[in-house]
Amino acid sequence: MKSRYQAHDYFSSESVLNSGGFVYLDEIDAVLPESLVYCQNLHYLQVALATSNVSCILCPNSLRGESLTTEKTLIFCDDPRTEFFRLYQKMALVIDGRATDQPVMGENCKIHPSAVISPRARLGDHVEVSANAVIEDNVVIEDNVYIGSNAVLGAEGLITLRDDCGVLMTVKHQGGVKIGAGCQILAGAVIAKALFQTPTTIEENCQIGIMTNIGHGAVIGRNSVISGNTVIAGRTRVGTGVWMGTSCSVAQGLIIGDGAQIKMGSVVINNIGDGAVVSGNFAISHRANMTAHLRKLQ
């Protein structure tokens, strides 16, 4: 059973309002009960207060004067994000504590001799892993998946944090990756492991193109095609049946609706609705983009 931690065990009593506890560390839209999250401003504090799974919130000292009515535990500090990840490192979350010398592997798998597979990975039936592919800890691969040469599943993600002296802090991700049945992960693709309990997820029957990069905690909906050299930043949610052309860039935390099409080379910085077709830098309606382009040629 998961341990319950008390806020006052990690933070001074002067910084804690409504002393209480937590079980998990998570993001602002926590999916697990009794989670501790952090916020940087009043808007996100209000979001956290309204999220039923959040029990403790790290807040900036600048919000101490706000009129807040809540039974949740508030912890005030100068830099909530840095304090959160210091706690994250201390707790060293473990998603799967199995002790084993060999990965769990299904029937009729085809593994190239040069592939590297963690003993804490799980592979389903009929999985093919090509030359020099790397499958790290806490990666779950379902049936009938193809992994191309030099692909990396479960890579460390990117978090840029500096300590009080300005030195970069290393935050080792403790989450995992889940690859749904029937997916194709092509050569050189990199899928970062998640920070939290919900894995970076590629749902069923997706194709992830050559040299594509999927950030930590992202979810790619089933039957989607993400073409080569595309970068999808962390925590983005891509819907069902989405198509992205070559060399797209998608900012973190966005929502891409079902059936959306994102044309080659697009730079996406806003949510995209269901069925929308967008292009450009920054991406807008493809029809409007092409109309403007043709006017320039006249």
Image (spheres, rainbow, N blue to C red):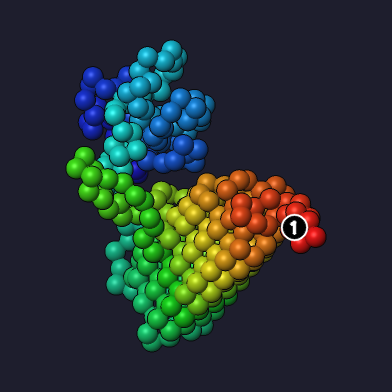
Q: Residues within 10 Å of mark 1 (few under 14, many from 20)?
A: few
- Residue at image coords 53%, 74%: 210
Is residue 91 rendered to the left or right of residue 44?
A: left
Which amino acid is tagged 1?
Lys
Q: Is residue 2 above or below residue 280?
A: above
**Quadrant (top left, top right, bottom left, bottom right) of the N terminus:** top left
- Residue at image coords 27%, 40%: 87
- Tell me residue 96's x, y (percent): 36, 57
Q: Secondary structure at mark 1?
A: helix
Q: In front here: 248 or 146?
A: 248
User: Would you name the residue on which mark 1 appears?
Assistant: 296
- Tell me residue 24's x, y (percent): 37, 40
- Residue at image coords 67%, 62%: 263
- Tell me residue 289's x, y (percent): 73, 54
Q: In front here: 98 or 295?
A: 295
- Tell me residue 295's x, y (percent): 78, 56
